[in-house]
Structures are given as C-alpha cells and as structure tokens.
Image: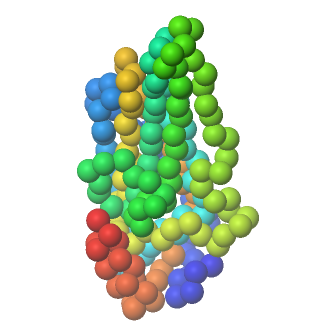
Amino acid sequence: MATGLKTTSSTIIVSGTVTESGANTFTQAAIDLQLNPLDNEVFVIQAVDMDVGSPDALAGTDTEVMGSLSQTNRATMGNLSDTNVFGVAKESIRAAGYVDGGVGFTKVGGETPAIANLDYIAVLATDSFFAQIEGFQNTVPKTMNFKLYGYRARAAASVYAALVQSELLSS
C-alpha cells in the first residue's frame, strides 16, 4: 500500500463504456467515483483492463482503434508518456497495398502493469477520471469497455493536498 494512505474498502471494480459520437471522432466520457473530499478519500488503482474492440477490415486501408484512461480531462488521445494517463489500448489493421483486407495486429497483455508487480498503478484524488476513444478510417463508431480494480483509501492531509495539486497541474 502507498505511504500516507489508510485502506477503507476491499477491492472495488469500476467498469464502464465509451462510444465514439461518430466514426473516427475523438470522444471522451467522465466517470464519477463519488469520492468524499471532506474525508480526503482517494481511489487507489491496482489494475486496469481495457478492450477497444476491432477496427474495420477494409481492403487496401489501414484502420485503427485507440483508447486511453486518464486522471484529467483531455482534448486528444493519451499516451503512456503523458503523466496523467494510466491506461492505453490500441488495435490496428495494416491493409495498405492488400486487396483482401490486410493483417490484424493485436497486443495481448502488457498494456498496463499487472497487480502482482506493483502496489498500485495510480492514485485518483479528484472525484472523476476520464475515458477516451478514437478510431482511424473506420466506417462505424467504435466502443471501448474497461474495468479498474482498486480500493478506496483515506489520505493524510499533506498527501491528499499533494495528490490533488498534482492532478490539477497535469491537466
């Protein structure tokens, strides 16, 4: 467990879905965790599971579906190199030059650290996190499903203040 935090719940699973508002359109949804700021309540993320589905298999056309989860509101897709992003997923089909629809590329695992390797992936101190999805050259809107595994905790006042400030400054 992270220093300065006292666990107040058992493991909680938070699941959700975000669907593009139109094909190949960046779309974001805010997911409310209903944290209690008066008690310095935070959510400690232990693991993330994301499924962005499959891009369209179109002959001669590269297609892609990307998804990300972040601590703060974003205007673009997130990458793991962004400090406020704690999960990413990407599925691609490389078909340029192929008349049959190309070859699909799938990454299995490795998108987020496993719970066995780390105490936690991220600590959310504000009451919402954000899910983003965006396709590339698909014919229909795509959907991302996700689950966060974690627990509620109470942070020491100084730790809570630092976490909130960090989230606000990284947006």
Decide: is 102 above or below 5.
above
x, y percent for residue 122: 51, 68
Farthest residue to the bottom: give it. 158
* Viewer-closest of 47 and 15: 47
- Snapshot quadrant of residue 12: bottom right
x, y percent for residue 137: 37, 24
Residue at 38%, 29% in the rendered image: 136
> Can residue 10 be seen by looking at this rendering?
yes
Q: Is residue 124 left or right of residue 114?
A: left
Farthest residue to the front: give it. 97
> Can residue 101 be seen by looking at this rendering?
no
Decide: is 106 above or below 101.
below
* Viewer-closest of 82 and 163: 82
Residue at 32%, 70% in the rendered image: 170
- Snapshot quadrant of residue 16: top left
- Snapshot quadrant of residue 139: top left
Residue at 59%, 69% in the rendered image: 120
